[in-house]
Structure formats: C-alpha cells, structure tokens
Amino acid sequence: MATSKEPIKLRRRKMPSGLTSLYLDIYIDGKRSYEYLKLYLVPELKRADKEKNRTTLALAEDIRAKRMVELRNGEFGFRSMYKEDTLFYEYYRAMCEARLGSESRGNWGNWYSCLHHLKIYDDNEQLTFRDITPEWVQGFKNYLEKDAKAWAHDYRRRLDYHPLARNSKVSYFNKLRACLNQAFEERIIPYNPLRGIEGFKPEEGKREYLTIEELQRLSNTECNYPAVRRAFLFSCLTGLRRSDISKLTWGEVQKQGEFTRLIYKQKKTGGQEYLDISPQAAELMGERGKPDEKVFDDFLTAGATNHCLQIWALKAGINKHITFHCGRHTFAVMMLDLGADIYTVSKLLGHRELNTTQIYAKVLDKTKQAAVSLIPAIIETAEDAAYPDGKKQTDKN
C-alpha cells in the first residue's frame, strides 16, 4: 500500500554566516510555501554546541508536528482554526481605519497609498487570504520595483507620472508585511506567504544637522516667530519629533530631582517613552500649566514652520536646508560628538533598532577622520621642492 508524502517537511539552509537556518517546506493542494522558524543550528565546535543544536532541532520538530496536527484537523472535517476565506481588502481597510488618529498623518497616508497600488496590481475585491501566495507577494514586489508610478490626488500632477521613490517602495511593501504579519498572528492564515521574500532596502538619505557652533549662533539670532524658536531649540536639546512636541502636555512632564522627565507615547510608533531632559531644555518649556494643557500650544503648520526656520537660519549665516526634523538629527549627532555611547543615544531617541541610530554614527565618524590624518606627507609641495634641505632662506638687510 502506497503511503502519501509528508506535506510538511523540516529542512535546513546553510547561511553565509556559518549558521544553518531551519524552515518548514509546506506543499498543500499543489502549492508550495515556506515557514522560516527563526531557529538556527550553530557549528558544532564543542559539546555545548551539540547539545544546543539537539534542543533546537527538537523545538523545530515540535513546531512541524503542531502544523501537521493543524493540517489534519482541517482535512478530516473539524472546524478549521484559520479563516483564510477572509476578504483581503476588507481586512486591510479595517487596519487603515484602526490607525486613524494613532499614527502620524504621513504614515497613515502611506497605508492608503499602498492600498491604491495594491488595487492597481490586483483589483479583485473578492480576493481572500487564501489567494495571497508567495508568488502573489513576489508579484506585488515586482510591480513596485518596475511598474508602479507616483500617485497624487491632484489631477494636474498625475499628467507627469514618475517612478516610485525607493523609500516609497520600502514603505508600501512594509505595509503589506504588517498586514500579513497581523493576519498570521490572528490565525487568519496558517503560514505567512511573505516569509523568505526580502523587502526593499531603504535609500540612505543625507542627514542635515547643525553643529554645536551653528546651534549657538542660531540661538543668539532673533527669530521672527518666538514659538518656532522655542520648539525647534527644544527638539535640538531633546531629540523629540515635531509630532511629539506638538502634542506634549504638562501631565506628561514630571520633576525628577535636578532633571525633568517626560513620560509620553511616541506618535509614530506608539511606544511608551521615559526621557530625562536637561535644565536648559526644561527652561524652554516655560511656566508650568494645567495637566491637560499643551506645553507648546502655538504651532504653525509644518510648511510654515520650515519656511520660518529657513529664514532664521539664513539670518544666522547658516547656509543649510533646515527643516524641523533637523532638530532631531542635531541632537543625535551632538550627543555622539560629546562622547555619549551609541546605545544610550538610541534609547534617548526611542529607536527600536540600533541600526537606525548607527546612521548618525556614520555621519560623525571621527575614527575615520583620525585614521586618515595619520597618513604622512607623501606628495611633494612646491615649497618642499624649493627648499630641499628643509630650510627657508630669509632676506637679511
């Protein structure tokens, strides 16, 4: 009697780092998919390595067995624990609506821009999560890479379409990733079709910032809008984004000995933050108000604020393209320049990943500057040629 092949197999993949990645090879109804377990075998250099690999393999096998049980439950008529017939676009739109008011306007807009491109790629409103295969996901990535055009609400601007910027591709693909990750967590789908498909790498843009000397010069220059001056300098001294400064209330400000502590939620990430600020930053907040009152309550629009900053910078003799977000960059670079370690700076900025903070370390890499300064004189200058003995003759009258 012939036996059917195992539909879920545990497989290994050697990685350039020397580790071996464990993943599930899933073949169901003529469709192949993969579930990467984020479990790795290490080179067996000592007995402890062998024991670690034995434990890792046992865990991976347990996951495979669990997936087999889940699959059989569906095959033998029990109620499936997954809801793959859920309409994809209906689910995605619900995610968009849930983010309204809790995320920055720009990021929330990116969710809808991604939806626009998803509908161009596949306009089937009856599309279900069962239809979202690795091939479908790869197809959407290829569409963003090769075919997608920048989109605007203004009809006149649509006449001059141009390819998507690299960071737009990153953002839109990450929105799809977030949707599928949530669907997997909520057991809408038994596996994530995005696993194993690499996203776009973000474009490394220039980080404009002010040096300490430029910041001092700007502070000593009159600004036409004192409220803009106060908020921008506060950003330079704390690293807070404009979105977090604009919503900061006195109830989120606490006195902690000589320092003042801000206890707030980042608007961009929703993460709870505890930030100690310096006395001069605290002084910029002014006289304390009621708990529900905003600390900075006289904000201009983002465009007007940046225009004001540009005029202020030019008055101070600073020829740089200054926006409000430069305050955050200035704080990061200044902290590193003054000797703060990158881990501490990462925590002060509220970064989730250290890699994000390392961009600023690249901007201010004094180790490289010190290294190139070690190169001895190699190229002969005109003065060296004129005085080979190293002595310059002087006229004696």
Image (spheres, grey):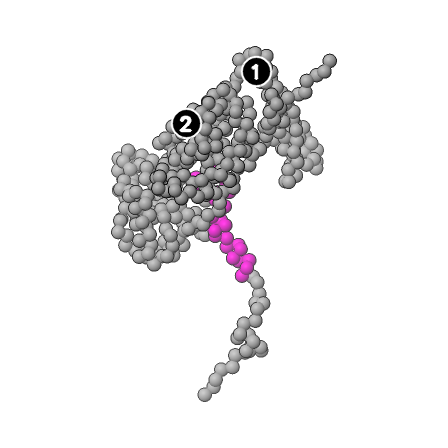
Query: Percent x, y for residue 234?
Result: 34, 46
Looking at the image, can residue 383 be seen? yes
Q: Nearer the viewer, residue 222 or 285?
A: 222
Look at the picture and state if 117 lies above or below 61.
Answer: below
Query: Percent x, y for residue 81?
Result: 52, 17
Amino acid found under the numbered disc labelled 2: Arg
Q: Secondary structure at mark 2?
A: helix
Query: Percent x, y for residue 141?
Result: 52, 36
As for residue 365 lying within the magenta part, the answer is yes
**Disc nearer the start of the sequence (2/1):** 1
Q: Which residue is mark 1?
A: 74
Mark 1 and mark 2 in contact (Cβ < 8 Å)?
no
Q: Which residues are magenta?
A: 348-373
Tag count in the figure? 2
- Is residue 112 left or right of 387 when viewed as pictured? left
- Where does the N terminus fall, quadrant-wise? top right
Look at the picture and state if 123 lies above or below 323.
Answer: above
Q: Which residue is mark 2?
A: 93
Q: Secondary structure at mark 1?
A: helix
Q: Residue furthest bottom?
A: 397
As for residue 324 lying within the magenta part, the answer is no
Count neighbours of disc 2 (C-alpha within 10 A) and say few if under 14, some if 14 to 19, many if 20 or more. few
Which residue sits at x=60%, y=24%? Answer: 31
Amino acid found under the numbered disc labelled 1: Gly
Q: Residue furthest top?
A: 77
Query: Percent x, y for residue 374?
Result: 56, 61
Look at the picture and state if 397 lies above or below 309.
Answer: below
Which residue sits at x=43%, y=40%? Answer: 150
Looking at the image, can residue 186 be seen? no
